[in-house]
């Protein structure tokens, strides 16, 4: 017994709070910064669960690459004060009631299902090192790796195509 | 080697469920497409957390591998979706997803 379980609950509370903040902010940059804190606390949880490689990937790729991509687009579109005012107009009070009720119902259903499982056990935090992950990844999941490569290539071509047409249109104007 | 953690598997699953539902709630209430994509990221993270927790329960690397596939999927999705956001902002001069309902270029 150590402080690990306490760290887990603290990180979980931080993740939930910042996720709620990220979803409800009006300023896109503020929401993205809250999202970074959510991702970092999930990375802490990965470390505690004994998945150091997943934690490193969470920080490097999610918090480092994906959120920066979001920030680039937010800066490129130049979302300033006017967009905050427009967000207040779009986020009318009262419109969140039905989604909140639906989420609550789903929570009850999910929670009931999880509590029904027979296979309950404690997580001991047995560390699975990156070497083991790499060995299994490139033996049993080799086809998945190839498919992920094809998917990323398709995304690259798609993103290039969308960006290229945008540049051409701007040149014509 | 362990991290001396001792918590029930259900607690991690409950955290994943709560994060997933916060993301779903965000997708439902927002009209700005950037915030909808941000909520989708939270939902995918919740899925990854559930996979890693299940992998940690049996101390197998499969959970982490599934998380890496989710990561690749998220990266691909964000790249294409942000290209679409830029196009939407150029053509309709708004980020309101309801304006892009005509589907003719």
Image (spheres, helix red, strand yellow):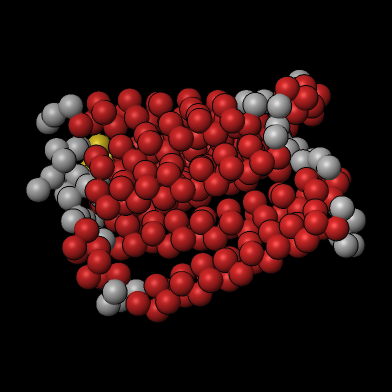
A123 with respect to B31 (left or right): left
A117 with respect to B83 (left or right): left
The N terminus of chain A lies in which quarter of the figure? top left
| Residue A146, position as x, y percentages in the image | 42, 77
B59 with respect to A23 (left or right): left
Q: How many marks?
A: 0
**Residue A113 visible here:** no
In the image, is residue B28 above or below residue A173?
above
Residue in view at x 44 percent, y 56 percent: B71
Residue in view at x 85 percent, y 46 percent: B92
Tell me which corner region of the image, top left, top right, bottom left or bottom right, holds residue B62: bottom left
| Residue B59, position as x, y percentages in the image | 21, 56
| Residue A81, position as x, y percentages in the image | 73, 22
Which one is in front, B62 or B97?
B97
Which one is in front, A142 or A161?
A161
**Residue B84 visible here:** yes
| Residue A108, position as x, y percentages in the image | 54, 37
In the image, is residue A29 above or below residue B78?
above
């Amino acid at each position: 017994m150590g402080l690990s379980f306490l760290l887990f609950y603290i990180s979980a509370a931080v993740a939930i709070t910042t996720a709620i903040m990220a979803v409800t902010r009006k300023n896109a940059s503020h929401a993205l910064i809250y999202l970074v804190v959510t991702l970092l606390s999930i990375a802490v949880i990965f470390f505690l669960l004994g998945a150091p490689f997943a934690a490193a990937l969470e920080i490097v790729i999610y918090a480092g690459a994906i959120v920066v991509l979001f920030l680039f687009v937010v800066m490129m579109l130049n979302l300033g004060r006017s967009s905050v005012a427009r967000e207040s107009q779009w986020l009318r009070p009262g419109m969140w009631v039905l989604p909140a009720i639906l989420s609550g119902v789903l929570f009850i259903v999910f929670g009931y299902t999880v509590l029904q499982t027979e296979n309950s056990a404690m997580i001991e935090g047995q560390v699975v090192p990156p070497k083991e992950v790499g060995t299994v990844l490139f033996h049993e999941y080799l086809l998945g790796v190839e498919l992920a490569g094809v998917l990323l290539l398709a995304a690259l071509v798609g993103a290039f195509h969308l960006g290229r047409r945008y540049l051409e249109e701007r040149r014509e104007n | 080697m362990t991290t001396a953690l001792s918590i029930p598997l259900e607690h991690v699953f409950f955290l994943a469920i709560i994060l997933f539902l916060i993301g779903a709630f965000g997708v439902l209430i927002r009209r700005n497409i950037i915030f909808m994509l941000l909520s989708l990221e939270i939902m995918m993270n919740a899925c990854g957390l559930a996979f890693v927790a299940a992998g940690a329960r049996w101390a197998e690397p499969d959970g982490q591998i599934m998380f890496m596939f989710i990561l690749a999927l998220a990266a691909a999705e964000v790249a294409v979706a942000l290209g679409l956001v830029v196009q939407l902002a150029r053509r309709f001069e708004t980020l309101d997803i309801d304006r892009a309902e005509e589907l003719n270029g």
